[in-house]
Image: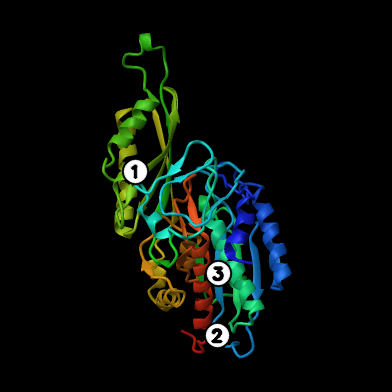
């Protein structure tokens, strides 16, 4: 079975996570994919496939004869899809022999335009996979899951040499909680890769430092006719806080290593308002300054409006994995070599986001990220090519081959 065929099955199992429930997993639908993965890994003959009480799926493939001294390598993907587009009904659409032009989706009048997405010309001639326009596709990260399972299938069925292979699928990555209950020691990998990136051949070992901020504003609401020197409008206080932040340092106006403040939620009335920000920067010192800048903006607003209340809850989410991978750059170099072995051009770029691998690297499991072949994640214009999924699977197998030949403990 090819990776895309598995992916089509996985994509139809809706698994949006939610940052509102406070449960693990955050949505019960993630159990459906977890159980399906356990069943498939069991049928393939992996060792001890299971899903634990936190909806983390694990399984192992013992080293083949002669490769027992090779380091154990882990491969991980996440099962949830973005809550930014939470619909659970996903209907993948295949476009065989795609011509490289605009892609008209069957529903909602949506079009994936080549003028907006120049990468489409590189997919010409391939079998393009999209959603129907009414939902996201879920290649982030069900494509990664399908590629990892297909890698395992080929290792077994083709009798390819390999060291010990450790496989895991996590819930709630999209809300930053994927590794919350992950047992690195029990997983047993010396090194690992998440398969959760974009274009095939992509290799990422730098990511944002990240923080989340929630600002609760309690105003003073009175009748507007008698409000002079009394009313404190919570919405206007929120506007004042945001106005103190650099207007150019937002996602829509930054790229590469440039950090940002992202106002992700603002709702309220005169009486009360809530703001939610995410703060991102690759550089740890600039990241710290951004947090201080938001804190100062809240303190200024509180001082200017003493009869109102401004409460800031600011928490770090994850850090740049580069700090933990400096002694393990063979992971990156071997991924580049594996990409070339699979006929791909390796591309190393910083992640303008984060992965489970960022946190796992700080938990003692060095874990760069690899591309799945997908594009336009987190929305209805998402797409991926079947042939690119084949190439990513070949790249994973090449990584396994490289480490199966490794005998010294790097």
Q: From the viewer's perspective, is residue 83 above or below residue 284? A: above
User: Judging from the image, what secondary structure is the residue with disc 3 in?
Assistant: strand
Most foreground residue, 81 or 211? 81
Q: Count residues near mark 1 (Cα–Cα under 10 Å), then give few for <14, some for 14-19, many for 20+.
A: some
Quadrant in which residue 188 is drawn: bottom right
The CA distance from mark 1 to mark 3 is 39 Å
Reading the image, the residue beneath label 3 is: 75
Mark positioned earlier in the residue sequence (1 or 3): 3
Look at discs 1 and 3 and give the one toward the viewer.
3
Q: Earlier in the sequence, mark 2 or mark 3?
A: 2
Which residue appears at 54% of the width and 40% of the height? 134
Mark 1 element type: helix
Q: Nearer the viewer, residue 189 or 217?
A: 189
Which mark, by number, is residue 295? 1
Which of label 2 and label 1 is nearer to you? 2
Q: Which residue is mark 2?
A: 70
Instruction: Report the side of 270 relative to 157 (left or right).
Output: left
Q: Residue at x 31, y 16 (%)?
A: 229
Q: Is residue 216 above or below residue 250?
A: above
Q: Is residue 236 left or right of residue 200?
A: left
């Amino acid at each position: 079975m090819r990776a895309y065929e598995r992916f089509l099955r996985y994509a139809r199992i809706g698994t949006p996570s939610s940052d509102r429930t406070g449960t693990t997993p955050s949505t019960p639908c993630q159990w459906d994919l977890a159980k399906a993965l356990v069943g498939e890994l069991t049928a393939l003959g992996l060792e001890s496939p299971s899903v634990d009480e936190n909806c983390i799926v694990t399984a192992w493939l013992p080293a083949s004869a002669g490769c027992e001294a090779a380091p154990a390598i882990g491969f991980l993907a996440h099962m949830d899809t973005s809550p930014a587009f939470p619909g659970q009904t996903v209907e993948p659409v295949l476009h065989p022999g795609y011509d490289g032009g605009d892609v008209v989706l069957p529903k909602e009048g949506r079009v994936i335009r080549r003028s907006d997405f120049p990468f489409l010309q590189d997919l010409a001639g391939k079998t393009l996979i999209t959603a129907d326009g009414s939902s996201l596709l879920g290649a982030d990260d069900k494509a990664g899951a399908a590629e990892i399972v297909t890698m395992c299938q080929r290792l077994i069925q083709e009798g390819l040499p390999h060291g010990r292979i450790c496989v895991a699928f996590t819930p709630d990555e999209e809300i930053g909680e994927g590794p919350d209950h992950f047992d690195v020691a029990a997983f047993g990998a010396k090194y690992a890769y998440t398969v959760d990136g974009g274009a095939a051949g992509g290799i990422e070992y730098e990511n944002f430092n990240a923080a989340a901020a929630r600002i609760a504003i309690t105003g003073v609401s009175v009748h507007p006719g008698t409000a002079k020197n009394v009313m404190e409008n919570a919405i206007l206080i929120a506007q004042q806080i945001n106005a103190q932040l650099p207007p150019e340092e937002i996602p829509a106006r930054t790229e590469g290593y440039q950090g940002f403040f992202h106002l992700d939620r603002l709702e309220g009335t005169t009486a009360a308002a809530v703001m939610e920000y995410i703060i991102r920067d690759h550089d740890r010192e600039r990241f710290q300054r951004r947090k201080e800048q938001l804190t100062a903006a809240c303190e200024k607003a509180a001082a200017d409006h003493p009869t109102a209340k401004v409460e800031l809850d600011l928490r770090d989410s994850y850090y740049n994995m580069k700090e933990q991978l400096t002694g393990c750059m063979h992971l990156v170099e071997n991924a580049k070599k594996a990409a070339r072995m699979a006929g791909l051009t390796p591309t190393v770029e910083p992640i303008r986001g984060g992965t489970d691998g960022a946190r796992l690297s700080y938990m003692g499991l060095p874990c760069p990220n690899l591309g799945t072949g997908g594009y336009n994640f987190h929305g209805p214009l998402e797409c991926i090519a079947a042939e690119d999924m084949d190439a990513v699977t070949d790249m994973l197998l090449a990584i396994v081959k490289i480490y199966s030949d490794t005998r010294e403990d790097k």
